[in-house]
Each structure stands twice: as structure tokens, then as C-alpha cells.
Image (tube, rainbow, N blue to C red):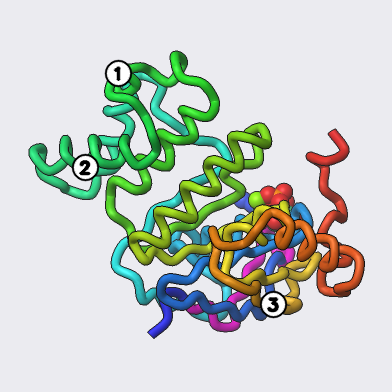
Amino acid sequence: MTALTLDGVGHAYLGRTILEDIDLAVAPGEIVALVGPSGCGKSTLAHIAAGLTNPRTGRVRRGYARHAMIFQDPALLPWATTAGNIDYGLRLAGVSRRTRSARIAKAAVQVALEPEDLQKFPVELSGGMRQRTAIARALAIEPDFIFFDEPFTALDVALRRRMQDLVIATCAAGRISGLFITHDLSEAARLAHRVAVLDTRGQGILGERLLAGAPGHRSDKAVFAWVQAALRQDPLFRHIHDVDERQIA
Ligand SMILES: Nc1ncnc2c1ncn2[C@@H]1O[C@H](COP(=O)(O)OP(=O)(O)OP(=O)(O)O)[C@@H](O)[C@H]1O
Ligand SMILES: [Mg+2]
């Protein structure tokens, strides 16, 4: 049983084909990074995989019990405290009040938020604390699968690294599977067991590369060497930086 299987998934917006013939599987406990240039349909694919959007063609099979999503924008409720934001998802999930406060406290510890941070409002938090709150909100519902859609792109390098380490450690400890969308090959090489490359125009998965060793056990040197080799020698990654507006801006 896989945690997630996409079978011939295709999609179109306003008659324009965005995705075609996407086959992708994620094994239990596995983190698969999905990379591809801007606009190739990664977010659309994540939405289909998570069930937020119905695919035009193909099917999605989910072998996990409960998923959470973490996006680039932490999307916190501005009128709720950190605790209130984490609580929101738990209430939606129908978790009892008593269990909720224990879950909030546990998730806060996991992402290294202090008890006093739980009483702050989003405007009072730094960018990193806001993103950690979004991660805590996802972890609190105790998912066994997490969809990540470029969650750390807006963070500075040092903070991004800490967030990546947090994801690596929590996913490994809880045997959580995940689909991690990113533009950043070194992020993929640190976090994932496997990297899948989406075609520039969403016409299938071009190919996959298995990464040696487990996430969290690769040296910086090994990660750097893998990225250099991928960019210089591997035709699969030839178009990875095409039409990326954020790099031009
Ligand atoms: N709701 C929508 N209606 C119409 N077109 C859409 C919609 N959402 C996305 N698209 C189009 O679908 C294509 C794929 O978009 P998507 O957001 O999936 O790409 P992406 O790979 O996630 O890009 P990025 O890396 O910039 O986030 C784009 O051409 C986009 O304009
Ligand atoms: Mg996107």
C-alpha cells in the first residue's frame, strides 16, 4: 500500500491543459520532492493530490489516514493568537477541548515556540515564528501525510535551514510521508528520499532520482555535490530554472 498514488492525472483550466498523464507514488514514511519550473503545474498537482481540486482525468489513491498542508504563505488568522491559530484546525477536526490544549502545547514544543509566544497575535511574530506556527498547526492534527507547497521560499537562508531540519526530524520521528514542492534543488536534496521532476508544461513526470542516504544524514558537502552534478550533468534538471519570475524579481 502506498501513502499516495497518482495515476494518469490530468487537468485543464478554461480549456487549457495544465497537467497530463501524471503518475507519481509516495511510499509510507517517504518524502518525495517535486520540482519543476514556475507555472508548470506543481501547485495544481498538490491541490489535486490533496483532494482540494478534482482531476479532469486519472485517479488519486490515498493510503494515509489524515493529511495536513503547509504553504508558502503561513495564512494565519490575524485576529487569533498563535494558540488560537493552532486550535482552529483542531476544532475543525472535532478534537475535544481537553485534548486540544495538550496538542497545542506539544506542537509548540516541536517547533520551538515558547509558551509566551502562544499568546501573541500574528502581527507580533517574526516571519519565522509565523511559519513555525503554520507548521505547528499542521503537526497538531497529527497527520501521517503532509503536503508542502514551497513553504520556506520566503524565509532567509539560516531560518530556512532550521525549518528544513524540523521537517526532516518530525517526519522521521512520526513516520510521516510527504510531497514537498520546491524550486530549490538543495532543499530537495536535504529533505527528500527521492526527487521527481515535472515537465515544463505539466506533460508528465520527466523522471525521478533517488537520493543516497536518509534525509538528515547527508553532509552539506554531499548535498552541494549532488546539486552541482544535477545542474551540470543531468539532462533531467535542464529546465529547472526556466521562467522563474521570482528569481528575476
Ligand atoms: N484557478 C486557476 N484558473 C486558471 N488558471 C490557473 C488557475 N490556477 C493555476 N492556473 C494556471 O495553471 C498553470 C499552473 O499553475 P500552478 O500554480 O499549478 O503552477 P506552479 O508550478 O505551482 O507555479 P509556481 O512555481 O510559480 O508556484 C499556470 O499557467 C497558471 O496560470
Ligand atoms: Mg505553485
Residue at image mark 1 = 116
Placement of 115 over or under 172, stated as above or below: above
Task: Verify whether residue 15 appears in magenta.
Answer: yes
Q: Secondary structure at mark 1?
A: helix
Q: Classify the position of the C terminus by image quarter.
A: top right
Per the rendering, the mark at residue 103 is 2
Three-letter amino acid code at the position of disc 2: Arg
Task: Verify whether residue 153 appears in magenta.
Answer: no
Three-letter amino acid code at the position of disc 3: Glu
Mark 3 or mark 1: whose residue is earlier in sequence: 1
Mark 1 or mark 2: whose residue is earlier in sequence: 2
Specify start and end residues of the magenta stretch as a single range: 5-17
Task: Give me the C-alpha separation between circle 3 and circle 1.
Answer: 44 Å
Between residues 55 and 23, which one lies in front from this camera angle? 23
Task: Give me the C-alpha separation between circle 1 and circle 2.
Answer: 16 Å
Image point (76%, 65%), residue name: 226
Per the rendering, the mark at residue 208 is 3
Image point (59%, 72%), residue name: 213
Placement of 93 over or under 56, stated as above or below: above
- CB-based contact (under 8 Å), mark 3 and mark 2: no
For label 2, the crowd category at 10 Å Cα-Cα, with few meaning under 14, some 14 to 19 and many 20 or more, is many
Q: Main secondary structure of the magenta part?
A: strand
Q: Secondary structure at mark 2?
A: helix
Whole-percent x and y of residue 73?
Answer: 55, 36
Where on the picture, by quarter, is residue 72?
top right
Whole-percent x and y of residue 145?
Answer: 40, 63
